[in-house]
Image (spheres, rainbow, N blue to C red):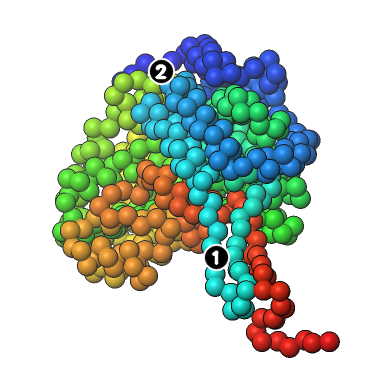
């Protein structure tokens, strides 16, 4: 058991760390109290910029756009390169803030900052590779090509669980694409956002970027709604619950804006009889219990062949027994707190419902460290054996709660994997090449992320990140996700001195 830091210890550490990253705390002081999930106590009191703040920020960003879109993309990349260097210098500080505000263990908090450094590297390379295509024209003496141009202001709404990295995926790419960013971070993680932003501002200032190119607006739903509805926001990138996404998507579509939605997941692993169980157990435990079950990619379901389901469950339960739970910043701890009481209550209610549906709780569940941290919510990661995929299994409970379901043939396993409303991430553990290929095929998993012999979480930034169905369909981060941040112009250039019309149309006057 580890000692839980006191209110004064954590608050002092958070404020000193934020200051070291360049945050002007006086400028953001206010009366909205933020709390650390580590001890459930006050960290800071900060301002709320709200809807009026959004208006002002978007209008500054629109001005910045006019200047930034004229800066050559590789020069924009140079500013992002500097951002990556400064992130590396501040890696430990930013990770401390992520731990304090999101409750992540140090290794995962550092991983989140590394993910930011990685996306900067990616974006710098991308700044020289914003390729358009050329196509053969059907007309003589004509050239047909496409050019990608900066799009406009990008609004980013991010969630508490990746308080830094998700913004950076959007921002690093948006900046090289020539777009300003207005960020509405989670209300639960304001200091992390302010610190990340202060580091970016330093990089931008060193590269003479226009004022207002990157802004943070602190606030609650009213600020989020203002950003979503603002006609000056060309692309709205939102990460959060499916409920939030179903409000955001239509609202942006109504004004013909673009949205990029990264919503809930209900990620499963199929475990076949030929799976290497040592590797499988390690893969599942990281994806299901890591980050205290609070990633959108967290594994929430295991669909195990009936012949291995008992042994797998026993081995998972034994591993769960050994999971050190406690102060996320202490050495050796692997499971930190849930974000708040609501998250714990949702987990407890889901465990109860699953049992009422015929499931049996075989590991974990329940609260720990209640005496040491009465205002914080540390939960024992839980495993529930289920015979059937009932409604509660189809819902995303944002907590370390893993359902284990049996299957008899592989087609049934694929059907179970796909039989939920969400479509973010999925895995198959197998040594059978045909099963692995089938799972990855058009008839296989319907998710945006489909893995073999690795868990559902912890994706690298180089691939496009996102999922289908209720996950929202957006793609962020690597591959060609940058295209969402630019507009495409198709150019037909006539150097023939004649005017032949396409499709052989004759229009001679
Ligand atoms: C999220 O939980 O919103 O693949 C993002 C992962 C991380 C990103 C998660 N790279 O788990």
Tell me if residue 212 comes above or below residue 26 in the rendering.
Answer: below
Of 287 and 231, nearer the camera is 231
Of 197 and 352, nearer the camera is 197
- The residue at 55%/41% (across/down) is 74
- The residue at 66%/31% (across/down) is 209
Percent position of residue 236, x then y = 64, 49
Percent position of residue 468, x then y = 48, 60
- The residue at 59%/65% (across/down) is 145
Residue 62: mark in rendering? none
Tell me if residue 324 comes above or below residue 351 in the rendering.
Answer: above
Q: CA distance from mark 2 to mark 1?
A: 60 Å
Percent position of residue 447, x then y = 42, 60
- The residue at 28%/32% (across/down) is 323
Within 8 Å: ligand 1 and the Cβ of disc 1?
A: no
Position of the C terminus by quadrant: bottom right
Query: Callout 1: 10 Å neighbours few (<14), some, many (20+)?
Result: some
Foreground label between 2 and 1 = 1
Q: Residue furthest front?
A: 497
Tell me if residue 217 comes above or below residue 92 in the rendering.
Answer: below
> Would residue 376 be visible to someone looking at this image?
no
* Quarter of the view holding residue 250: bottom right
Query: Callout 2: 10 Å neighbours few (<14), some, many (20+)?
Result: some
Are the residues at dot 2 and dot 1 in contact (C-beta closer than 8 Å)?
no
Residue 460 left/right relative to 215: left
Of 425 and 24, nearer the camera is 24
Tell me if residue 137 comes above or below residue 384 in the rendering.
Answer: below
Residue 4: mark in rendering? 2
The residue to which callout 1 is attached is 134
> Would residue 138 be visible to someone looking at this image?
yes
- SS state under label 1: strand
Question: Looking at the image, is mark 2 or mark 1 earlier in the sequence?
Answer: 2
């Amino acid at each position: 058991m580890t000692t839980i830091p006191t209110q004064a210890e954590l608050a002092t550490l958070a404020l000193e760390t934020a200051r070291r990253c360049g945050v002007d705390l006086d400028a953001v002081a206010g009366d909205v109290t933020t709390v650390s999930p580590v001890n459930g106590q006050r960290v800071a009191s900060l301002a709320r910029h709200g809807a009026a703040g959004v208006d002002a920020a978007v209008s500054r960003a629109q001005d910045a756009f006019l200047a930034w879109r004229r800066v050559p993309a590789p020069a924009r990349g140079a500013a992002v390169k500097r951002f990556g260097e400064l992130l590396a210098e501040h890696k430990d500080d930013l990770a401390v803030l992520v731990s304090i505000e999101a409750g992540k263990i140090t290794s995962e908090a550092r991983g989140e900052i590394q993910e930011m450094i990685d996306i900067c590297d990616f974006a710098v390379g991308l700044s020289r590779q914003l390729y358009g295509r050329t196509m053969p024209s059907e007309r003589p003496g004509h050239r047909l090509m496409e050019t990608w141009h900066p799009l406009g202001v990008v609004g980013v709404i991010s969630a508490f669980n990746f308080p830094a990295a998700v913004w950076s995926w959007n921002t690093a790419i948006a900046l090289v694409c020539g777009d300003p960013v207005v960020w509405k971070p989670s209300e639960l993680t304001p200091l992390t956002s302010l610190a990340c932003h202060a580091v970016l501002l330093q990089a931008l200032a060193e590269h003479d970027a226009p004022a207002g190119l990157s802004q943070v607006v602190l606030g609650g739903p009213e600020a989020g709604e203002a950003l979503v509805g603002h006609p000056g926001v060309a692309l709205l990138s939102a990460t959060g619950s499916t409920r939030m996404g179903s409000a955001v998507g239509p609202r942006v579509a109504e004004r013909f804006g673009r949205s990029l939605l990264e919503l809930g997941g209900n990620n499963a692993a199929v475990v076949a009889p030929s799976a290497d169980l040592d590797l499988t157990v390690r893969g599942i435990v990281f994806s299901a219990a890591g980050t205290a079950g609070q990633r959108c990619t967290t594994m929430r379901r295991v669909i195990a062949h009936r012949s291995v389901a008992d042994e797998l469950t026993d081995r998972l339960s034994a591993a769960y027994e050994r999971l050190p739970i406690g102060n996320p910043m202490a050495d050796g701890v692997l499971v930190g707190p849930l974000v708040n009481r609501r998250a714990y209550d949702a987990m407890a209610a889901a465990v109860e419902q699953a049992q009422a549906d015929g499931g049996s709780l075989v590991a974990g569940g329940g609260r720990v460290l209640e005496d040491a941290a009465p205002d914080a919510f540390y939960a024992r990661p839980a495993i529930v054996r289920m015979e059937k995929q009932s409604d509660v299994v189809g819902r995303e409970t944002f907590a370390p709660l893993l359902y284990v379901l049996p299957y008899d043939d592989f087609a049934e396993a694929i059907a179970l994997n796909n039989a939920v409303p969400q479509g973010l991430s999925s895995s198959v553990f197998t040594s059978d090449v045909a099963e692995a290929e089938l799972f990855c095929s058009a008839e296989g998993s319907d998710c945006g992320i489909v893995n073999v012999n690795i868990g559902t979480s912890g994706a690298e930034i180089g691939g496009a990140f996102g999922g289908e169905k209720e996950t929202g369909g957006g793609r962020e981060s690597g591959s060609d996700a940058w295209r969402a941040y630019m507009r495409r112009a198709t150019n037909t250039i006539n150097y023939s001195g004649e005017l032949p019309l396409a499709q052989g149309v004759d229009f001679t006057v």
